[in-house]
Amino acid sequence: MSTETIDLDLAVLDAWIGDQLPGRGERLTAERIGIGIGIGNALFIIRRGAHQWVLRRPPAVKNHPSAANTEREWRILQALEGTSTPHPTPRLFCADPAVLGATFMVMDLVDGFCPGAGIPADIASDPKAMFDLGMAYVDGLVELAKVDWRAKGLQTLGKPDGFLERQVPRWLGQLDGYRVRKIAEEDFLAAWLEANRPPMSPAAIMHGDYSPFNVMVGHGKPVRLAAIIDWNTGTIGDPLLDFGHLLARWVEPGEQGPIRDEEALAGYPTRAQMAARYAEASGRDLSALAYYEALSLFKLGVILEGGYARGKKAEIPDSENTVGATVDRLFATAAQFARGERR
């Protein structure tokens, strides 16, 4: 979680914005948002007169060199302009870190709520609205996979050839870079994922961390996805990994959450219903869905293990360095998908 202090030089920022956005001559203010809820980037609502936007920049300290890539996010948001994929409208990008100490981007403020942080009572109390909300997550991924990424100039965003073949070696290599322990189910998962790797689904834009925490939903009913947000890990690859990530973190009645103790939300569709919707709407083959579900949790577990390793090296006791238990839980749930014990 990001709890660091980052100050914006508002005079410098205002001068850099200049006439690129409306309201020049009016006082520019900034309000930090999203602190302490797991957002990797630093977010600010900036206001100038009656106008307001969101400024997004990397944190002062990155957990990994590839994290918080603002330029990558900017490229994807620009590519999504004119498509049916809901997204924040990009306005400005500054590639010069000398301006604010890091690259940054400015985008429109999305009018809506983040369902990962809480669902308004008018929707939470309505089973049909909740069902529609779950399916809206699915539909967002369907629309994203339709975008012609080549026509949008994203040929250099990722390396789709061999995407699945690189996954296990890549994440094991990252894990070895900060390894402090052997994780239960690690060897089983690595071997199973290599032995059960399917042919790659046709390449598409991937979000990289798709969940209810990274979407915004419009207020009121009917339920509609207002924007998919937080694109800094986006790439060109197998879009079924995004869908596997969404379903792998989904909790149904009687199940233990893969990350923390949480109860299934009444009215939400089941994973089977969501998979049927995705398959019908996208035309993609989901026969290897368990592979993508297991891989997504394996990947997330490796990423979070970096936080546990830093705490371990700082001699923080496991009673306080609880991310280690979260990693164990992620790997255990991934193994359940691999073994067919969770569907």
Image (spheres, rainbow, N blue to C red):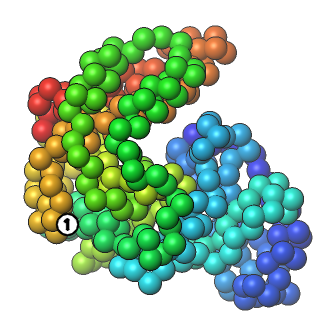
Q: Dividing the picture into quarters, in which one does residue 21 lie? A: bottom right
Can you see residue 75? Answer: yes
At a point 36% along the width and 72% down the height, the residue shown is: 147
Q: Dividing the picture into quarters, in which one does residue 309 lie? A: top right
In the picture, which quadrant includes the C terminus? Answer: top left
At a point 22% along the width and 28% down the height, the residue shown is: 195
What amino acid is labelled 1 in the image? Answer: Ser
At a point 27% along the width and 77% down the height, the residue shown is: 221
Name the residue tied to disc 1: 282
Counting every numbered tag in the picture gives 1
The answer to whether residue 90 is left or right of residue 189 is: right
Tell me if residue 308 comes above or below residue 9 in the rendering: above
- Residue lying at the far front in this picture: please name it: 161
Residue 220: x, y in percent? 32, 76
Residue 12: x, y in percent? 88, 69
Residue 29: x, y in percent? 77, 71
The answer to whether residue 97 is left or right of residue 338 is: right
Can you see residue 130? Answer: no
Tell me if residue 17 comes above or below residue 94 in the rendering: below
Tell me if residue 37 comes above or below residue 283 in the rendering: above
Q: Secondary structure at mark 1?
A: helix
Foreground of the two, 183 or 3: 183
The answer to whether residue 246 is left or right of residue 174 is: left
Residue 229: x, y in percent? 47, 62
In the picture, which quadrant includes the N terminus? Answer: top right
Q: Residues within 10 Å of mark 1 (few under 14, many from 20)?
A: some
At a point 42% along the width and 11% down the height, the residue shown is: 182
